Amino acid sequence: MESDGQSLLCLPQDVNLPFFAYGALKPGELAYAQISDLVSGEPIAAKASGSLKVRDGLPLFEPSGSGTVRGFLLTFRPEKCMGAYDRIRRFEPKSIYRWKKLQLQTPEVYANVLEGRVPHP
């Protein structure tokens, strides 16, 4: 069944930024297949300041946490950025995540990341 759009996660403010994947959409996880055809080049191992919490089996990134989260930097082909983020927003629930622009520790670039909405239930 197609969603009415109101329950969908919005698009990030800048769809031209790469995506920091730390959960089900990172390489090696089953959901990566949903976006792998839109990725340009090889995924790059990356780190972000913050912590991961788990709620109902879902990893929730908390940028204010005091640690390091390992993941992958995914850069999308320029003509496919909008499509890639559309697939991500249809996969990840709006009630759990919101977009955040974040400067990564390594590599030192800005990326879009899915931040957990309620890291402390």
Image (cartoon, helix red, strand yellow):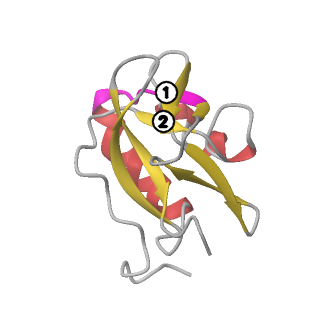
Q: Residue at x 63, y 48 (%)?
A: 52
Q: Residue at x 60, y 31 (%)?
A: 71
Q: Quadrant of the N terminus?
A: bottom right
> Taking 95 as reference, is 10 above or below it?
above
Residue 12 position in % (x across, y down): 30, 52
Residue marked by disc 1? 73
Using the rendered view, name the quadrant where residue 99 is placed: bottom left
Left or right, 100 with respect to 55, comes to left
In the foreground, 74 or 40: 74
Residue marked by disc 2? 20
User: Would you call the spot at circle 2 few (<14 residues within 10 Å), some (14-19), or many (20 or more)?
Assistant: many
In the foreground, 120 or 100: 120
What amino acid type is highlighted by mark number 1? Leu
Which SS class for mark 1? strand
What amino acid type is highlighted by mark number 2? Phe
Q: Quadrant of the C terminus?
A: bottom right
Q: CA distance from mark 2 to mark 1?
A: 5 Å
Give the mark nearest the N terminus, 2 or 1. Answer: 2
Instruction: Please report the bounds of the magenta region as a residue range.
Output: 71-78
Residue 61 falls inside the magenta stretch: no
Q: Residue at x 35, y 50 (%)?
A: 100
Q: Residue at x 49, y 27 (%)?
A: 73
Q: Looking at the image, do the residues carrying marks 2 and 1 touch, with CB atoms under 8 Å apart?
A: yes
Left or right, 64 with respect to 33, comes to left
